[in-house]
Amino acid sequence: VDFNLAPQLGLSPTSPFTAATSSGVATRTITAGTSVGVTAITGTVFSATISDTTTLTLLQPAVLTITKTADPASGNQVEPGSIINYTVQVENQGSTVATGVVITDDLDTGVGFVSASGSSNGSFSENSGQIVVTTPSLGVGQMLTATWQVTVTAPTSGTLIENYANANSDTTSEIASNIVSHNVVTVPVTINKVFLPIVLKGCCLPNLIIESFNVQSSG
């Protein structure tokens, strides 16, 4: 932060301000801390009766948050071939614009990408199971939302499908979302009695007719 005073030429500013130059400006460079809020800086030139006060507002940098939800909701059971809808939301809760915001999501091996519903204000792509959503900037209080669908490909009952997403930007470090998970279950197939008319014709039993038979599962 450059703090500037403009005393009359010839006056001698007190340390740490520099002497007035030919432009009539005395300067001091101040390194702002991590505190967020308003602070006043007062500089005295020559005497206590000649002073200037500047109020500085220290802004919080961009702060991203990320959440992930699923439908069916996390913790539910899913069957092979069923659809899971994933939604990721990234919000800028800081005081400055976040630039170059990127969402990445590596899908679990137990699912396959189907389609995307797009994103609220960014571009969407998928390649070999990796989801990438980007936006050039995310303003203060703005949210980037992306939704996509996957199908359950894991065939084995008891398989755990877990998934989470990451987000970062030009001015923030990478953060991870919460984990959403689903348990794969297979529905047992029950074979009921089946009655079908079958006619057998042959040399030995030309007139034999089997009117019905039944099939039962060994279980």
Image: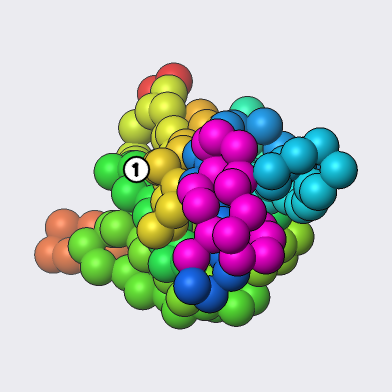
Using residue 71 as the reference point, say whether residue 16 is left or right of it: left
Q: From which residue to which does the magenta span run?
A: 1-21
Where in the figure is residue 18, as x and y percent of width and height? Answer: 49, 48
Tell me what residue is drawn at x 36 percent, y 74 percent.
125
Instruction: Look at the image and tell me whether residue 89 can be seen.
Output: no
Drawn side of residue 205 relative to residue 96, left or right:
left
- 25 vs 194, nearest the viewer: 25
Q: How many numbered discs sit on the rendered protein?
A: 1
Q: Nearer the viewer, residue 156 or 83?
A: 83
Residue 7: give x, y in percent of width and height.
Answer: 68, 61
Q: Position of residue 133 (x, y in %)?
A: 44, 67
Q: Quadrant of the C terminus?
A: top left
- Secondary structure under the numbered disc 1 in the rendered image: loop
Disc 1 target residue: 108
Q: Nearer the viewer, residue 115 or 40?
A: 40
Q: Main secondary structure of the magenta part?
A: loop
Using residue 195 as the reference point, say whether residue 172 is left or right of it: left
In the rendered structure, which amino acid carries the disc numbered 1? Asp
The x and y percentages for residue 72 are 66, 46
Report the front residue among 71 and 30: 30
User: Residue placed at 55% from the left, 44% from the top?
Assistant: 17
Relative to 173, say whether 212 is above or below.
below
Residue 112 picture quarter: bottom left
Name the side, left or right, on which 158 lies relative to 77: left
Looking at this rendering, what residue extends furthest in the front direction?
A: 10
Q: Is residue 116 magenta?
A: no
- Residue visible at 22% across and 62% down in the picture: 128
Q: Measuring 53% from the left and 75% from the top, which residue is drawn there? A: 23
Task: Classify 218 as above or below 68.
Answer: above
